[in-house]
Structures are given as C-alpha cells and as structure tokens.
Amino acid sequence: MAAIPLCIPNNCSWDETSGAFQRDSSQPRTGLQPVNPALRKLRSIGGPVCVVSIAGPCRRGKSYILSRAFDQGDVFPLGHSFDPETMGIWLWVVPEKYTDAQGREFTVVLLDSEGIDAVSAEGINDHAIFTLSVLLSSVLIYNSVGVPTRTDLEGLEYPFRLYYVLICS
C-alpha cells in the first residue's frame, strides 16, 4: 500500500486505479487541486484524528523521515534524482490506532508535503503548500538541514502573518 495525494498542482494528474502520477509541463502551474479519493478516505475516518505533517527544503528526506517516524515502511514515494518526488501534499492514514494519555483511541494521519525551494516550483507554490500544511496539522515537523537559519525562520513566519491578516481584517 502507498500514500495517495491529498492535493496536487493543477498541471498534474493522478490515476486512482494505477497510482500513476503525471505532470503536464506544457501547462503552467497556477494552483492546487484536491484529489477526491483522498477526501473520501479522510471522511471515512471515525473518531478523533491527529494530523502530523512534515515540511522543509526539497530533497532533504522528508518522505523518508515521516514514514520511519511511525514505522510505516516506504509509504511515501522516495526519489533519488534532482527532480522532486513529492508534488503537492500526500496522505497516509496509519492503520494502527493510538491511545492518548486519557486512554482514548485516535487515528494518525500523515501528510508529506512538496519541498520548499524546488526548481520546478515558485515561491508562491511554497507558501501555498506550507500554509495548507500548517492549517491542516495537529503537529508540524519542520525538517531543516542542520541548525535552522534566519531564512528558515522567515519562511515559517508566512502562514502566521497570513492568518493574522485574515483574522484581523
């Protein structure tokens, strides 16, 4: 079993039957589109949910880290080339239930996001994916290379500035 896309760039497609993901480079990337099978999967979850997402620079092992953190094998696609493997945000529902400190069961949903500063994307794409990841998450893992830099922290600031503008307007 493998993860499925929750949302993908508008110039990409995913086939539910084969699991094939394709990018149409002749079309401009202008936004994200939701993927209905992932929405159905989310709607089918009963009870409390903890959404854990990961974000950070491209090609730094986010998919691998997220899979391993919950002992899920290689559920997220892993790549070994210059081009990013993850486009948009991909979803995996951990099959095992977890129990909180009060003894209540909950489901863990993992969200793997496209890396920041990918050659095939623009800054506006990074902001959209990162903001969506923050808004959907109960827990956000920020995967940096070494000690976070000032640029990393400035990037983390964007969704919170946007939230402030939306709430205070």
Image: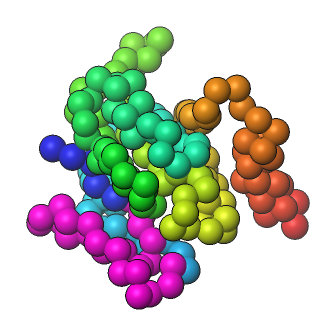
- Per the image, is 35 magenta? no
- Per the image, is 22 magenta? yes
Q: Which residue lies furthest to the front in this view?
A: 82
Residue pictured at 42% horizontal, 58% vertical: 83
In the rendered image, the vertical position of residue 139 relative to residue 11, given as above or below? above
Residue 56 percent location from the top left of the image: 58, 43
Q: Quadrant of residue 1?
A: top left
- Relative depth, front residue between 91 and 95: 91
In the rendered image, the vertical position of residue 46 relative to residue 121, given as above or below? above
Q: In which quarter of the image is residue 7?
A: bottom left
**Residue 89 visible here:** no
Residue pictured at 25% horizontal, 36% vertical: 74
Residue 112 percent location from the top left of the image: 43, 46
Left or right of residue 15, residue 33 in this image: right
The magenta span reads 6-29
Q: Which residue lies furthest to the right in this view?
A: 168
- Relative depth, front residue between 146 and 160: 146
Residue pictured at 67% horizontal, 65% vertical: 123
Left or right of residue 91, residue 16 in this image: left
Image colouring: rainbow
Left or right of residue 130, residue 91 in this image: left
